[in-house]
Image: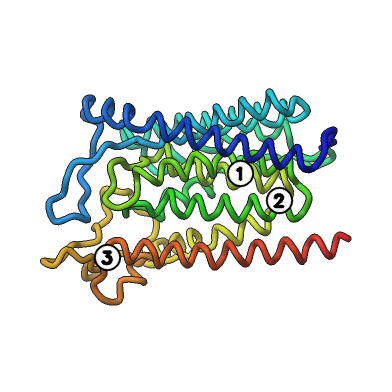
């Protein structure tokens, strides 16, 4: 991409987009939560002894903040207009797939196919002189990453917190490598996720739903391909990859209704059920722990790999220089 404004200006634009996304999501969430509750779009928080009903599909608020943040970026940085429009289109399509899945529960096959189609617009901003196989792999990457961030979920704040950690790592890495324009995308998502986390942290007032979890993975892929930081994106996704690998090798491909949920004991702590599939969360649950403890440990794992990604960006920058 050709930059026609100075580095400090690009950093400022990225920060402005993050702030706008944050406040749009933060201000929208209370009303959205009420609307979702009134519409009975709720789910039981099965990891609480009382199993309270919590608003679902709160990821709509993340999507709203992110899209408006990118509209601000288009106004402030018209040079990136086409790339940002494609980014918005992909994320909105992925979000729509998530909404449909939240409402009618798509099968794994249906979701994979729809996510692949949602990622197709990325072909329009693929690098020049690449083959058809490479272009078809781009939407496949969207499908895979969206499902990875959708699978490591279920505890208060775990998805939005891990997503915020990944976006922080990608934003810092892009800036270190001089890709300030691409950081606009990750910063916009970071702002929306941080605002959502205020309502999603323990005790959660709202769940992101698939509309929220799927767009996190899709955004990681967008930043990876647009910014050419695929290795760093892969590293920040390692916690999700480990979780997915554990589930697949222990139980194969499973529909969500076949999953046996993590249990709550008499003290209100989480315990891994006997048998069933393995996962990163259940690997952490070697002994009973509170939900907050488990989430913090998973976040720390995410921070570790996020830090590795940032360190790698320094190495890559040095090798380029």
Above or below — where is 96 with respect to 247? above
Q: How many marks?
A: 3
Residue 127, compared with residue 277, is above or below; it is above
For the residues bearing labels 2 and 3, Cβ distance under 8 angstroms: no
Image spot of residue 204 (x, y percent): 29, 47
Mark toward the start of the polypeptide (2 vs 1): 2
Reading the image, the residue beneath label 3 is 276
Q: Residue at x 66, y 62 (%)?
A: 310
At horizontal 52% and vertical 34% (from top left) the residue drawn is 21
| Residue displayed at 58% across by 32% down | 90
Q: Would residue 123 be found to the left or right of residue 150 on screen?
A: right
Of the numbered discs in the image, which one, if any, rests on residue 174? 2
Q: CA distance from mark 2 to mark 1?
A: 9 Å
Q: Earlier in the sequence, mark 3 or mark 1?
A: 1
The answer to which image quadrant residue 43 occupies is top left
Are the residues tagged 2 and 1 within 8 Å (C-beta)?
Answer: yes
Give the mark toward the camera: 3 or 1. Answer: 1
Q: Quadrant of the rendered structure where residue 105 is? A: top left
Residue located beneath label 1 in the image: 186
| CB contact under 8 Å: marks 3 and 1 | no
Element under label 1? Answer: helix
Using residue 305 as the reference point, say whether residue 33 is left or right of it: left
Quarter of the image that includes the C terminus: bottom right
Characterize the local packing of mark 3: few (<14), some (14-19) or many (20 or more) Cα atoms within 10 angstroms: some
* Residue 316, x across and y down, in percent: 78, 62
| Left or right side of 5 for 13 | left
Check disc 2 and report its element: helix, strand or loop: helix
């Amino acid at each position: 991409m050709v930059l026609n404004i100075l580095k400090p200006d690009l950093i400022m634009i990225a920060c402005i987009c993050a702030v706008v996304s944050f406040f749009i999501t933060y201000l929208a969430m209370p009303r959205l939560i009420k609307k979702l509750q009134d519409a009975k779009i709720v789910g039981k928080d099965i990891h609480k002894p009382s199993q309270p009903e919590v608003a679902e599909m709160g990821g709509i608020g993340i999507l709203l903040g992110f899209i408006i943040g990118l509209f601000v970026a288009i106004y402030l940085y018209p040079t990136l207009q086409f790339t940002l429009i494609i980014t918005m289109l992909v994320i909105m399509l992925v979000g729509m797939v998530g909404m449909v899945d939240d409402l009618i529960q798509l099968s794994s096959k249906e979701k994979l196919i729809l996510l692949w189609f949602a990622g197709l617009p990325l072909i329009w901003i693929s690098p020049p002189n690449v083959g058809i196989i490479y272009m078809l792999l781009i939407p496949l990457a969207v499908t895979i990453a969206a499902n990875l961030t959708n699978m490591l979920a279920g505890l208060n704040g775990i998805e939005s917190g891990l997503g915020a950690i990944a976006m922080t790592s990608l934003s810092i890495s892009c800036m270190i490598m001089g890709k300030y324009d691409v950081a606009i995308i990750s910063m916009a998502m970071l702002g929306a996720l941080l605002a959502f986390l205020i309502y999603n942290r323990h005790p959660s007032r709202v769940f992101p739903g698939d509309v929220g979890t799927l767009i996190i993975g899709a955004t990681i892929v967008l930043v990876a391909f647009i910014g050419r930081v695929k290795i760093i994106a892969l590293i920040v996704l390692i916690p999700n990859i480990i979780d997915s690998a554990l589930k697949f090798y222990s139980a194969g491909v499973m529909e969500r209704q076949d999953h046996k949920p993590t249990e709550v004991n008499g003290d209100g702590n989480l315990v891994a059920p006997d048998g069933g599939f393995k996962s990163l969360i259940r690997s952490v649950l070697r002994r009973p722990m509170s939900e907050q403890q488990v989430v913090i440990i998973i976040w720390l794992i995410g921070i570790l790999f996020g830090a590795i990604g940032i360190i790698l960006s320094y190495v890559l920058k040095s090798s380029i220089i």
